[in-house]
Amino acid sequence: RFILKTRLIIEQAPLQSYYSVLIFSPEKSIVRIKFEKCIPTWIEGKPRVQAHWSAALQTLEGHSRSVTSVAVSPDGKLLST
């Protein structure tokens, strides 16, 4: 989920993701709990983040029934349900 939201930053500066994943992860996530001591002390203003992330990654709208399959085009620009 973190990578989906920060893909553009990771493409430009991949090493930034190590610290960013820690400070932007939910407070109760396994990653945050396990590695919180690794957050550098020079990061002073930490953002307010949720305690948990929901299990839903993406919500598909406009369907009258459940979506049972999804196909993504090779370039990643189109989605078919």
Image (tube, helix red, strand yellow):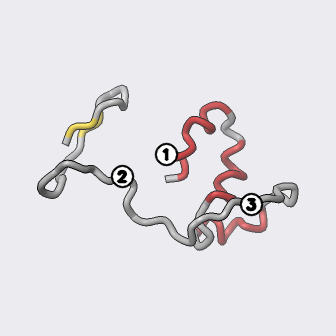
Task: Give the SS element for disc 1.
Answer: helix
Q: Could you give the CA–CA distance between mark 2 and mark 3, rounded to whole angstroms?
A: 26 Å
Q: Could you give the CA–CA distance between mark 3 and mark 1, rounded to whole angstroms?
A: 21 Å
Q: Amino acid at mark 2?
A: Gln
Going from N to C along the chain, the mark reached first, 3 or 1, is: 1
**Residue that label 1 marks:** 4
Q: Of all residues shown, which one is farthest toward the left?
A: 64
Q: Residue at x 52, y 46 (%)?
A: 5
Q: Amino acid at mark 3?
A: Lys
Query: Is residue 29 left or right of 62 when viewed as pictured?
Result: right
Give the total of numbered labels.
Answer: 3
Residue 65: quarter of image: bottom left
Query: Is residue 49 left or right of 73 when viewed as pictured?
Result: right
**Residue that label 3 marks:** 46
Query: Is residue 67 left or right of 39 when viewed as pictured?
Result: left
What is the quadrant of the C terminus in the image?
top left
Binning the other alpha carbons within 10 Å of mark 3 as few (below 14), some (14 to 19) or many (20 upward) gives few
- In percent of width and height, residue 22 lies at 67, 59
In the rendered structure, are the residues bearing label 3 and label 1 in contact, judged by CB atoms less than 8 Å apart? no
- In percent of width and height, residue 76 lies at 36, 31
Q: Amino acid at mark 1?
A: Leu
**Residue that label 2 marks:** 58
Binning the other alpha carbons within 10 Å of mark 2 as few (below 14), some (14 to 19) or many (20 upward) gives few
- In percent of width and height, residue 24 lies at 64, 57
Q: Residue at x 12, y 54 (%)?
A: 64
